[in-house]
Image (tube, helix red, strand yellow):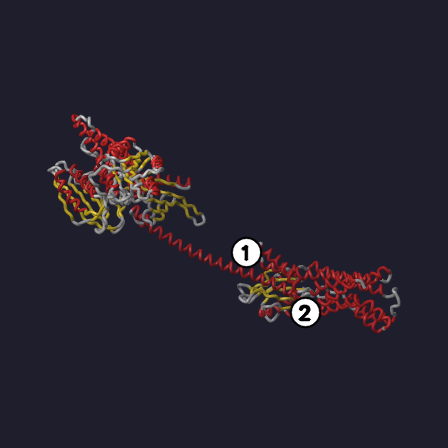
Amino acid sequence: MSAADVFVLVVCYLLVGLTAWETGRGWLRYRDRYRVDILFVVGQLVAVLLFGDRAIAIGQQHPFFAFIFNLVFLSQPFFLFRLVDRFHRVHNFVWALAIASPFAGAMAALVWPMTGPYDWTPVVALYFALQLSYAAWAFSREAQRASGVAGARLWFAALGTWLHVAIAIIFGLQAYSLAAAAAGPSLRHLLGVGVFACYYAGLVAPRQLRAMWEQRELYRHVRDSQEQPPDVRALRAADDLCRAVGQGVVSIARAVLLFDEARPDVLRTVATSDAALAALIVRPAMGLVGQSLQRGAAAAGRARDCEPELAEVTRRLGRSVWSVPIGNTDRQWGVLIVVQEYGSLFPADDLEFIQVLCRQATLTLDHARLIEAERAMQQRSAALRLRDSEVRFARILESIRDYAVLLVNDAGAILAWKAGADVVFGATAELMIGASAAPLYRRSDAEFRALLGEARQSGYLDDENPCQRHDGAVFFASTTIRPIHEQSVGLSGFVVVTRDETERRALAERLQQTQKMEAVGQLAGGVAHDFNNLLTAVLGYAAIIESHPGYDRALDEHLIEIRRIAERATALTRRLLAFSRRQVVQPRLVNLADIVRDLVAMLDRVLEDRVQVEFRAEAEGWILADPVQIEQVVLNLAVNARDAMPSGGTIEIRTTIVALDQPTRMGDSVLAAGFYSSLTVADRGAGMDAATMARIFEPFFTTKDVGRGTGLGLSTVYGIVKQMGGGIHVTSAPGKGTTFMVLLPSAAAEAPAVDLPDAGEERLDGHETILVAEDDDAIRGLLEGWLHKRGYRVIVASNPAQARTAMAGDIAVDLVVSDVIMPGGSGPALVRELQQQRPALPALYISGYAHATLTTEGHLPPGTNFLEKPFTESELLRRVRSVLAGKAKRVDEPR
């Protein structure tokens, strides 16, 4: 025997052993007779393939042995037909032949023993070929009808049986062909390996192989169902289950019965593959349906084992019935009924597969129930939200006080009158429902209907027009008209929304006034800055002319006039800076009453004899302010009151403390809640009308005759008060006098005062090196001359770039005198950059006004050295000497 033959025999023995082991273990577990039939089929094949030749030789010597061998050998088709009969009815003639042939063949072996190759072997081969071909055909036909695990196993069983037919044919050829006889055993053994392998995969099918087929079929089922939307998936769950079971299990009919929601004790057909089961109604009892639902597991039996109404239908369809529950421990949805004509060749596998599909259907139905419950909850929640929204909307409409919401019909009659309309138009719903809305908008009925028609045509209408309250008062309002046309609820008409614009227009006018004042202030600050530069040069060069050795004293009168005019111009620029809130202030803690009290004595000399001043301090109010600025406020208000009383009178000045419980508007300012020191200046003069009061704080606006005023007095007061964070309230009427009330934020008495730089020593000369950064050529030359004359070494620069270049060397600079704003940068930025190289380097800033680069809302940061233009030579030298001597604080960088 060759090595190949040995290998084939080993494989045959191995497959036979595995088949016998799996079949025997399954029989011990399930006690199913079809596994016994499989053992007989495989055993007979083993006997033929492995012991056929030896059995023939022994049979020639022992006839009784030949009888037994032939009886077992020829009965193989009978056991194969027993497997086929589980799913396909075997014809009676075939049964008779399968039963009679083994006995006839065994008797023939006794009567006519085998003596050579031309005996009964061809007849036996033909018998096997015909019988096995019938079984192979039945397997193939059923495999075409089935799919899934059963289909795969049937295809393997059919292939193994066809190979068995080939082995029978080879036996027959051996009697007529020496070549076939020589090659017969090896070829038979090789085909036998194929037969054993196919029967092992088909009739036995190990667990791993069955699980793979089940997973593939289940995956296809789940994939097809998951492609559907959740709602459709739930509706088609029963149909998909019927279809999947039909594809995976051989059956005549299938039906899905679910519990009726109206009658929970009754099952109704919702999906079926046979019309006979379509109208089925089953009441679960002690039949297969009741048993499967009670145990929660599949139940198998005959039609007679079912409930009466189910048995009547299934009896006409097939012999075998399965009932598989659809549900879980939480809920039973129903059952799946599977009707088979003759039963299943693989009942355990089929039932397991069906149960997996039923569990999948249970998940789908549970998911559908959750979706339905979620949808119902969402609907209830939506209904609650809608109701809450309606209530809130009604409350909102009732709480609206600035808008009037009306519903009018096509004729303009009022159908609905919301709460806001009561406030806007001053009428109640009882009075206005049914009345025409046209008089409210100061139009005739025809004109108002024309507006409604225009809104209907264009879809909306926005209009600004005067409206009339019920009491006759006229106000300006904005109105929006929107058409309504809802045929579903029979609603037609217009929604008219009207807003009282009186307050908004007043706010807009105040904003416009504020913006105008701010623009004028910026212009005034810029003019004052440039003017101060010019005045610095004028005063400086006038002093140089006066100190020149060749100066002619006959010109003193002219020089004095130049100085007087320059000083008047300086006072004018300071007023401009005060109005524009760009004046440098160095505040400290002061008592408002004390400042006014000290100033009253001077007012008696400033004001004319016909005017008396009455001062009353009702409270001592402490404020953080520059005393000079407070004196400017009092003086300007007093002069304005004097001019309002050309025939004389009394000016009342009063100081007190005012507490604001909430933010309060004063003019164009909104003051926060808190304590304020109040200054009131009142006169009994001519008073002012509304048009004059709207412009009193504008710079250069005056009602006085030409030459009697500059128009900067009240604008200076306005700028100072705004800069200090306060407010002004004016009360006046023609012929009744005017009262100015100024509120300034109060400060604690223990608040620290701001240290001011000392005036310095009288010694004005020096030898230090000073860097002067000034973009104005005239002032730069003036500063260089003043400092150089006093012994200082001066380095000049017209911009920050030149200053940085000058400081790039090893020059030891002791002081930087810098303008605040220059082309290419600012003075503070330049000083910060230079102090990175020389941290102790002091600085003195000069400028026509305190720019925001240097100040915080007009206040200098602590320790900042600042000299406001215009200034004199002595003022500059004293300040330079003071900074160099260390008597003033060093520069504290602005943040």
On screen, 363 above or below 488? Answer: below
Can residue 609 be seen?
Answer: yes
SS for dot 2: helix
Q: Quadrant of residue 454?
A: top left
Q: Quadrant of the N terminus?
A: bottom right
Q: What type is the residue that disc 1 sits on?
A: Pro
Residue 442: x and y, percent?
31, 40
On screen, 633 above or below 198? Answer: above
Q: Quadrant of the C terminus?
A: top left
Q: What type is the residue that disc 2 sits on?
A: Gly
619 or 786, nearer to the observer: 786
Residue 509: x and y, percent?
29, 40
> Which residue lies under the disc numbered 2?
26
641 or 323, nearer to the observer: 641
Residue 285: x and y, percent?
59, 70
Q: Is residue 865 left or right of residue 127?
A: left
| N-term mark: 2 or 1 | 2
- Label 2, label 1: how far apart the Cα atoms are: 40 Å
Among all residues in the image, which is located at the extreme left?
609
C-beta proximity under 8 Å, tags 2 and 1: no
On screen, 86 above or below 412? Answer: below
Q: Is residue 355 left or right of residue 400?
A: right
The numbered mark at residue 547 is: none
> Which residue lies under the disc numbered 1?
230
Q: Quadrant of residue 44?
A: bottom right
SS for dot 1: helix
Residue 269: x and y, percent?
59, 62
Q: Is residue 79 left or right of residue 682?
A: right
201 or 840, nearer to the observer: 840
